Image: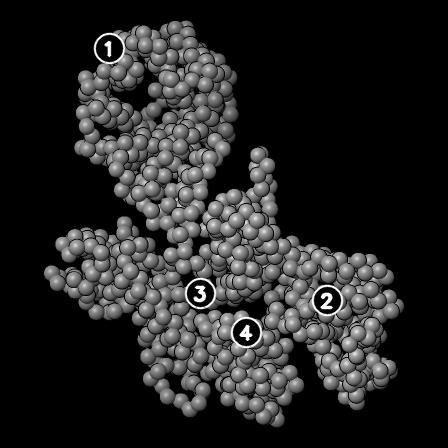
Amino acid sequence: MSDARIQVRLLGPVTIKVDGSALAVDTRKAIALLAYLAVTRRPASREAAAALLWPETDGPDARGALRRTISVLKAGLGDPGLVVDRSAVALDASAFDVDLWQFEEALAVARGHRHPGDDLCADCLGALRSAAALDRGEFMAGFALRDSEEFDEWQLGEAASHRRQLSAVLERLARGQAAARAWDPAASAARRWLELDPLHEPAHRLLMEVLARSGEPAAALAQYRDCLRILDRELGVAPLAETTDLAEAIRTGQLSADRETVPGARPARSSGVASPLGVEPVDGRAATAAPPLVGRDAEFAALMEAVAGIGPAGRLLVIEGEPGIGKTRLATAVANAVRGRGGAVLEARSYAGESAIPLSVIAELVRAGLTRSDALARLADVDPASLAAVARLVPIPGAIPIAIPREGEPFGRIRLFDALADVLDALVRGVRPGLLWIDDIHLADASTLEFLGYLAHRLANHPLGLLLAWRAEDLEPAARERLLAAPGIGPLARITLDRLDRPNVAILAEAVLGSPPGEMRIDALFKGSEGLPLYVVEALAEPGSSLAAIPGGVRTLLRARISSVSEVGRQIVAAAAVIGRSFDPDLVRATSGRSDEETVSGLEELMRRGLVREVATAATGDPHVDFTHASLRDVAYESLSLIRRRLLHARVADALAAAPAPARTDRVRWSLIAHHETLAGRFEAAAEAHRRAGDDARSVFANEEAREHFEAALGLGHPAVVELRTSLAEVLTLLGDYEAALFHLESASALAGPEQEAAIEYRKGQVHARRGDWSRADRHLAVALAANGDPAMRSRMLVDRSAIIGRAGNPDGAWQLAREAQGLAEANGDSIGVARALDLLGLLARRRGDFAAARTDLERAISIVEAAEARGASAPPLDPGVRIAALNALALVCADEGDTTRAIDLTRDALERCERQGDRHRQAALENNLADLLQRTGRPDEAIEHLKRAVSLFAEVGGRPGELEPEIWKLVEW
């Protein structure tokens, strides 16, 4: 890592940091320009850059946009950064640390060395490892421009070029590591190579042999089956002869494990099969690390208790759970424990690509048994007819396969099943109970399922354990019931695995890492994995990966699950992924474009396969559906092209806008519409949706959300600039950001017409009053009063001006204005205006020591607002701030009179309402007032807690970081 001040990461999601902080620019074009300059590593002419980034824009406009983009980028990068002249723009390379440059430099080192065969020196291996470690995913993953096909095409070309380079790096690294007999790193590199091109047979063969050499022949054959399945599904072809020959050599043991990893290893007999590694086999087996068993003590104990209970009759043991939950790991622990106690274990696994091969899994169990040194002795007592029947499936030394039964013979299949049961029993029987373990039963062929059901019904005659693991949602109900309902098997040990809790995620992480991870990393792992063990292990096994990213192994797993469903199911998944993790059936139907019947069938299929699940329904009884894991949604969404994403986002937005939503969800609806319209690229509609969502958020005092929506509407070019800036200023005022509020009001004032002038000036006066700038506040209110003729607005302006004059030291003038405001409000039936005037009159009475008059005015103000709230009044509009102010003022009066108990109750009421409104400045004042009251009553601990909150809130208010504004901190009443 260099010490350059600007770090640019393009090999994966784009990240740019300047002096350790993320680059702050307001346009994606600036990032695109920086990426282009970093990749090309040469100056770009202004004409070429403008044509790349603004291909549809006329020359002068494009050049003007480029000038602004260069200015923004130059300001964001600082000096040194960009080198700009009248004709071109370039990067000052001395200031930059670019991962793509490091990748190319490492590649140059490796290419500069020439070695015989696959042998690599330490420098080459180090360079290749460095290059591979720099890659974090697709080039500029997730980045695109909305309006430049030229840039998108350039980006795609660069991504393809990098993919080819990375493929070459991983191939050479895998072969070099294998030549050095570093099997685990070789397998890791080979798997990454395969992820780039799953159809590349040489990569499959390389991984197969690496696994076989490392002492994992079962995993090598599983890789062969994956190759078969992928080639058949994607190309409809069989593997090459070299691949098939290699698989047969591994299956028959001709290609043995390499037990030595140090110089001087004794070569074993050659298999006669061409090795994709070019490594001669040697004796031995390298140890392989497996993730520890965590959080499964009770389940493991239950299964081992069932094994211990095997006597004359056998036992059925079942492990169920979703993908990645740890079924295989738990079964492995049980199998190892059985072996440790002296019992025999035969294991096999079902594969999706072999569902057309009858009894393929059972044949694998028999082959596993025949590898035992005493296999022939064990089979000596088996009826020769049974051996002959089994020899039809698997060659058995000395057995002559019997003829295939004539078509229609009623008992031929039963005889074969009886023979298989006898042979397996003989191969696994011993002093200690043995175990037959089959993983992923849900993928087994129909004949295997039929045989297992047959064997389960006859375990009373076979003293062995039959351990089966499956995904319940993917196993046909009839087959599951046949297995679970088998009579005569003794108590059924059926384990359904749940996800891990946070403490167990921490234990698993520590075991994998070898040292305790930090709390933040545990939190990230637990949140990302949602307790799925495979996710945790894969995330920690991915070197240099971001905790926010889905690990490659899990991504591959989830993609395979999604691709296994029907075409309709995949369309439903795509639509649901665009909607979000949670969705309702009507919306997914409208988005997917399928019919009602197809949507229901698709959802039922997805539920059966465990991709989605029904969750708690709303009060209306409408069904609601959720992805079973957040990463499923992420993987499904990532697999969609940009064009299809935009299409589906547009459909979601249209469906949400067209369907009448219940009132309680309408606010959420507009926010969702804004989100989908933006991602659909329909920015005009998105701007209007953001405006409406902002209004809705403001109406329930969700001020931060309202701020975001209004800012988004402005950024997307909504034409109602004055109204939006005014609304944004109101929200910012409640948030205490007075500097920004005044900025938006000044901007609105510059664009406003005469009819809007009074309202804007009034709001300016209110903001200045909050800051304690009484003279400036009074000037704005005077202008507003002069320009406004609406009686209701004039009444409120008079109240605010009265408050300002009173704070400025003119109580008589304030009293007159308050009385004028009260009379004007009463004459126009403005009850809220009357309450505002009474609140101020009560404060003025308190200041002159007339507590009785103050209490009368304030209690009347509160009762007026309560009556309006009870009526559900909307004309005049209710202002919750009026009741809050009156409650606070009355509390102050009660405190003055010595009734601190009532004062505390009133202040708590006001504080609760203010918290709901989101007015931070006044909330700080109320926290401070409450702290004073609690201190008076001898409750210092409570007082200090409220004082801390008050200080924290006051510090946020004003909008000028680091600048103390005393009047803000002095607020007690208003």
Secondary structure, mark 3, is: loop
Residue 384 at x, y percent in the picture: 85, 84
- Which sits in the foreground, 726 or 417? 417
Q: Is residue 937 visible?
A: yes
Question: In this picture, is 898 found above or below 381?
Answer: above
Residue ID for mark 2: 449
275 or 474, which is in the foreground? Answer: 474
- Indicate the amino acid at tag 3: Gly
4 or 2: tag closer to the N-terminus: 4
**Alpha-carbon distance for marks 4 and 1?**
91 Å
* First in residue order: circle 4 vs circle 3: 4
Q: Position of residue 6 (x, y in %)?
A: 28, 61
Nearer the camera: disc 4 or disc 3:
4
Image location of residue 514, percent across then percent down: 55, 65
In the picture shown, does residue 34 fall above or below 873? below
Label located before the other in sequence (4 or 1): 4
Q: Which residue is drawn at 75% across and 71% down?
A: 436
Disc 3 designates what residue? 544
Q: How far apart are marks 2 and 3 (CA)?
A: 43 Å
The residue to which callout 1 is attached is 813
Q: Which of marks 1 and 2 is in front?
A: 2
Where the C terminus falls, by quadrant?
top left
Disc 4, SS: helix
Q: How crowded is mark 1: few (under 14 residues within 10 Å), some or many (20 or more)?
A: some
Quadrant position of the N terminus in the picture: bottom left
Mark 4 highlights which residue?
Answer: 232
Kindly indicate whether the residue at mark 2 contacts the one at mark 1 (C-beta within 8 angstroms).
no
Which quadrant holds residue 452? bottom right
Per the model, the C-alpha gap separating discs 3 and 1 is: 70 Å
